[in-house]
Image (tube, helix red, strand yellow):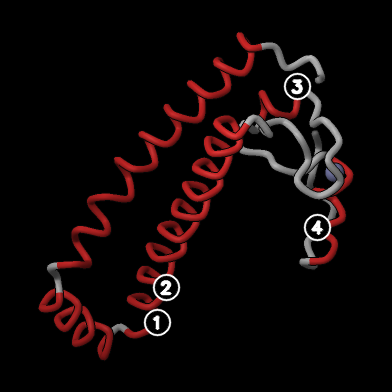
Amino acid sequence: MSDLTPAKLQELESALLLRRQELQARIDPQLHRSDESDELVLTEQKVADDNAVIADVLNDTDLAELELDLAVLVEIDAALGRIKAGTYGICTACEEAIPLARLQAMPSAHFCIGCQAKSEERQGFPHSASL
Ligand SMILES: [Zn+2]
């Protein structure tokens, strides 16, 4: 094992749980809203006829943020699952230990720096992994 002591692991788990709560608090009302807002959507659609571009941009931004939040939530749940399974802090691609500094900066990280860079290259992102 690396420099990931049980105390550090617990710290990271708390950080993940806290982040999870924040996300859930942001996501829940939005999901709730879209559940019961069929009428609201219809009204927005009418507004969109007059104001198509602006309405579209707003909706897409809301949706994009929600999707992003949900994606992060999934990552966090996966990380919490790895803590339970005892595989947390190990790169899921090459199985090398992920440096503690990287985990502290990004507790849901499941790739080491090298594999993160490779995966972003594959997805067409420029080099953005700094840790
Ligand atoms: Zn790796």
Q: Secondary structure at mark 1?
A: helix
Residue at figure coordinates x 45%, y 61% from the top left: 67
Residue at figure coordinates x 81%, y 37% from the top left: 130
- The image shows residue 1 at horizontal and vertical percentages of 81, 20
The answer for how far apart the CA atoms under marks 2 and 3 are is: 39 Å
The answer for how far apart the CA atoms under marks 4 and 1 are is: 34 Å
**Which label sits in the foreground, 3 or 1?**
3
Q: Secondary structure at mark 3?
A: helix
Amino acid type assigned to the residue bearing label 2 in the image = Val
- Of the numbered discs 2 and 3, the one sitting upstream in the chain is 2
The answer for how far apart the CA atoms under marks 4 and 2 are is: 29 Å
Marks 1,2: beta carbons within 8 A: yes
Q: Is residue 46 above or below residue 18?
A: below
Q: Which residue is mark 3?
A: 100
Q: Which residue is mark 4?
A: 119
- Of the numbered discs 3 and 1, the one sitting upstream in the chain is 1
Res 57 → quadrant: bottom left
Q: Which residue is mark 1?
A: 53
**Which label sits in the foreground, 4 or 1?**
4
